[in-house]
Image (cartoon, helix red, strand yellow):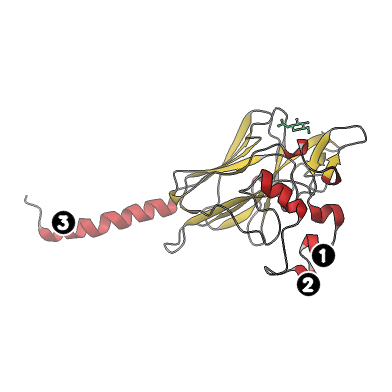
């Protein structure tokens, strides 16, 4: 019963590739956590060619979470929180003070109204050449709720990326959004949304890495949230190369 060198060789070559296969096809979970003291209605918008997940939006009570399987193929998109929502007629209708997606409960592929903080996610599975997931936090379209993105059990450099501060308390008055006159601040616009200039929006002649620059508004966001993208051609302050995480958690108000 002595193991033959041939058998050993066979096992030695099989076992690592077996491990690779398992890692490649391990299912991944997306979890959205509402750590806010109020309900939110997360929205999920897939980029072109990626499918709508969870109907594109759902209700998430305070201090609760919702997990669902990530697609087993490449997927990219964004997740944001809608706040201050109230039913608007039909069961599928919902009007939100921030992040509203066409007045629907399930966004079904529609994006949310700015301003809203975005978790941006790009997942790759299966390919041996690229099983990296990238993720980030963006306040390029303004801010409504702080959030963090946490990968679990990834290989490589997998930092938590976040914009945790409640910027509605500190953003410049020209960026503040109130639900109604006399109401508290519910969100902060980007400089682009507040003033609409080509320069602040990085449009036309300003649409290149050389001409699209930080502004005093994006610098306010950068100062509070150094890890977040704050204007169209902003570069990440913290890079990551995270392979095959088993779970990606987007936590609002954390
Ligand atoms: C953030 O600040 C606003 C006031 O500007 C407040 O209404 C809101 O509840 C705060 N959010 C959290 C999560 O504390």
Q: Position of residue 50 (x, y in %)?
A: 63, 58
- Image location (x, y in percent) of residue 135: 57, 51
The answer to the question of whether label 2 and label 1 lie on touching residues, with beta carbons closer than 8 A, is yes
- Does residue 110 appear anywhere in the picture? no
Which is nearer the N-term, disc 2 or disc 1?
1
Dot 3 crowding, Cα within 10 Å, few <14, some 14–19, many 20+: few
Q: Earlier in the sequence, mark 1 or mark 3?
A: 3
Residue 38 position in % (x across, y down): 73, 29
Please indicate whether residue 95 sits to the left or right of residue 14 in the image.
right
Q: Residue at x 72, y 65 (%)?
A: 212
Q: Secondary structure at mark 3?
A: helix
Quadrant housing residue 165 = top right
- In the rendered structure, the answer to whether residue 29 lies left or right of residue 101 reads left
Residue occupying image coordinates x 27% and y 54%: 15
Q: Which residue is mark 3?
A: 8
Residue 54 visible in the snapshot: yes
Which secondary structure lies at badge 1? helix
State the residue at coordinates (71%, 47%): 221
Q: In the shown orientation, is residue 155 left or right of residue 65?
A: left
Quadrant in which the C terminus appears:
top right
User: Mark 2 sits on what residue?
Assistant: 205
Residue identifier under label 1:
198
Q: Quadrant of residue 69?
A: top right
Please state which of the two labelled residues, at mark 3 or mark 2, is closer to the viewer.
2
Real-space Cα separation, disc 1 to disc 3, in angstroms: 65 Å
Label 2 secondary element = helix
């Amino acid at each position: 019963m002595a193991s033959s060198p041939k058998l050993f060789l066979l096992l030695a070559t099989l076992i690592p590739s077996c491990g690779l296969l398992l890692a490649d096809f391990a299912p991944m979970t997306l979890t959205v956590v509402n750590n806010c003291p109020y309900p939110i209605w997360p929205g999920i918008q897939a980029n072109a060619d990626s499918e709508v997940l969870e109907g594109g939006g759902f209700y998430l009570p305070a201090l609760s979470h919702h997990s669902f399987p990530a697609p087993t193929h490449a997927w990219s998109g964004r997740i944001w929180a809608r706040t201050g929502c109230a039913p608007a007629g039909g069961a599928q209708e919902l009007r939100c003070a921030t992040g509203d997606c066409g007045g629907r409960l399930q966004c079904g592929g529609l994006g949310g109204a700015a301003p809203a903080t975005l978790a941006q996610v790009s997942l790759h599975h299966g390919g041996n050449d690229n099983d990296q997931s990238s993720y980030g936090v963006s306040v390029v379209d303004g801010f409504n709720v702080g959030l963090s993105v946490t990968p679990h059990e990834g290989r490589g450099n997998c930092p938590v990326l976040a914009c945790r501060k409640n910027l509605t308390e500190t953003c410049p008055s020209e960026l503040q959004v109130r639900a109604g006159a006399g109401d508290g601040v519910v969100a902060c616009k980007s400089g682009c949304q507040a003033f609409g200039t080509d320069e602040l929006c990085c449009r036309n002649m300003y649409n290149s890495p050389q001409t699209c620059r930080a502004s005093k508004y994006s610098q306010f966001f950068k100062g509070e949230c150094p890890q977040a993208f704050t204007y169209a051609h902003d570069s990440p302050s913290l890079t990551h190369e995270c392979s095959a995480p088993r779970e990606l958690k987007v936590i609002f108000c954390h």
